[in-house]
Image (cartoon, rainbow, N blue to C red):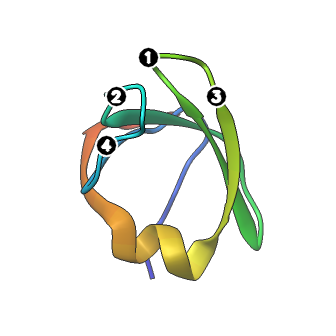
Amino acid sequence: MVDFKLNDVLRLRKPHPCGGYEWTVYRLGADIGIICNTCKHRLLIPRSDIEKRIKTFVSRGE
């Protein structure tokens, strides 16, 4: 199980349609809320799905 924190910047395996790979965590829980750093689109993704999609942490939150 991956330990997510608020304001973590994640790099996902596949790009968003806008071309951005980096996302910022804004909500924690059973679903993880992330914001695309390129176009500011917001998504809620189940924790199990985001653990599969994550490639690396660009920076860690508080």
* Residue matched to label 2: 20
Q: Quadrant of the N terminus?
A: bottom left
- Under circle 1, the secondary element is loop
Q: Mark 1 or mark 2: which comes first in sequence? A: 2
Q: Quadrant of residue 44?
A: bottom right
Q: Mark 4 or mark 2: which comes first in sequence? A: 4
Looking at the picture, does residue 38 appear above or below residue 33? above
Q: Mark 4 or mark 1: which comes first in sequence? A: 4
Give the CA separation, mark 1 to mark 2.
Answer: 5 Å
- Under circle 2, the secondary element is loop
Residue 9: image location, x then y, percent? 40, 35
Q: Label 1 crowding class (10 Å Cα cut-off): few <14, some 14-19, many 20+? A: few
Task: Please tell me which residue is depicted at 60% across the width and 73% down the height of the picture.
Answer: 47
* Residue matched to label 4: 15
Check if mark 3's residue and mark 4's residue have beta carbons within 8 Å: no
Left or right of residue 11, residue 3 in this image: right
Give the CA separation, mark 3 to mark 1.
Answer: 8 Å
Check if mark 1's residue and mark 2's residue have beta carbons within 8 Å: yes
